Amino acid sequence: MDLQPHIKKFAARMAEVETELGDPKVFENNRRAQELGREYARLKELVAQGERYLKARDELRENRGLAESDDGEMAEMAREEIIRLEEEVPQLEKEVQLGLVPPDPTDSRNTIIEIRAGAGGNEAALFAGDLYRMYTHYATNQGWQHELIGSSGADLGGYREVIFNLSGEDVYKRIKFESGVHRVQRVPATEASGRIHTSTVTVAVLPEAEDVDVKIDPTELEVDVYRSSGPGGQSVNTTDSAVRITHKPTGLVVTCQDEKSQHKNKAKAMKVLRARLLDQKLAEEQAKYAAERKSQVGTGERNERIRTYNFPQNRVTDHRIELTLHSLPQFMEGEIAEMIRMLIQHNLEEKLKEIGA
């Protein structure tokens, strides 16, 4: 594949974006300015990668010619360079090819994560708490902010449900492949006989919706307020601060009771509702061409088992890319960057196949 025309196209578009960013009027539209800024940074990196690739490719071609030289010393030096360049050029070529994949417009969005205990009772709730801790530790390591939106605690610890927001650079891009069913195999703390139990937790990852993404008619909302309660049903507030919002056209229901202020709970619930409606909209759009996209990283379905955490064997296995890591304690402490990097890489490679590159 001749990548030179694509590299020239990247450079031409970068010059266009640079010119547009040089116009003070563009900053009157903050969202547009941010989009252009992200596009410029991406193109600048792609052009730099392209230039490194073309330089290495030309050097390889030149050294192959020199390797046939009558000058024995020069030919030997050229052969040494060929060994290095034959390893370097394909790597640089792959980096440039991956740049041909158009970025997902939601990749830069902040993200709402919903974790729910599935099969396994109290053990599932405890593991839901473990996953919440894992993701918040990873977020801290990335320099992201996290905010609890709502939670429903379990009697023996952990969560029946916990919903939280992550904000920072490229949050959705890095965390979106966590959506699905997470299975845990371990001996519960409450198990006297030492028998291994299998439990499941579902994770939903939703890009935060912006006003232009989803239009919500206030007349289509049913808003109820009530007193918030903790585990076991005990009251934790003496005022009607908890909020339940029902979106009548879709039947979606969102509740929030973690704040003492009814106004704050309503704002958080609306944020979650917008994200769920956007997720629904994106899922419908994706379904239209799902038959053509046979090689994604999993299906993204909520009921898809994506990963197994086997504590007795100290391993975590991602079933979509058949990757197993034998560092489960560190993984549960938020050291999940390697897994995420491999998932992103695999997804890009599959998309590259789709566009025929």
Image: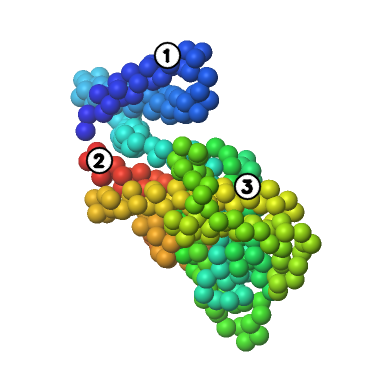
What amino acid is found at the position of numbered circle 1 in the picture?
Thr
Residue 191 sits in quarter = bottom right
Q: Position of residue 20 (x, y in %)?
A: 43, 16
- If you read the primary sequence from the N terminus, does the residue marked by circle 1 or circle 2 appear first? 1
Q: Is residue 13 visible?
A: yes
- Residue most extreme to the front: 219
Q: Which residue is mark 3?
A: 267
Q: In this view of the protein, which residue sits in the foreground, 263 or 311? A: 263
User: Hey, what amino acid is under mark 2?
Assistant: Ile
Place of residue 257 in the rendered image (x, y in percent of width and height, measured from the top left): 68, 58
Tell me which label, 1 or 3, sits earlier in the chain.
Answer: 1
Out of 254 and 190, give the one closest to the viewer: 254
Q: What residue sits 48% from the left and 57% below the top?
A: 248
Q: Nearer the viewer, mark 3 or mark 2?
A: 3
* Quarter of the image that includes the C terminus: top left
* Label 1 CA crowd tier, 10 Å (few <14, some 14–19, many 20+): few
Q: Which class describes the residues within 10 Å of circle 2: few (<14), some (14-19), or many (20+)?
A: few
Instruction: Please report the residue visible at 38 percent of the width from the left and 16 percent of the height from the top.
Output: 15
The answer to whether any part of residue 73 appears in the image is: no
Amino acid under disc 3? Ala
Q: Give the residue number, with chain letter if any, for mark 2.
A: 355
Q: Residue 308 at x, y = what percent?
A: 48, 66
Residue under pointer 1: 19
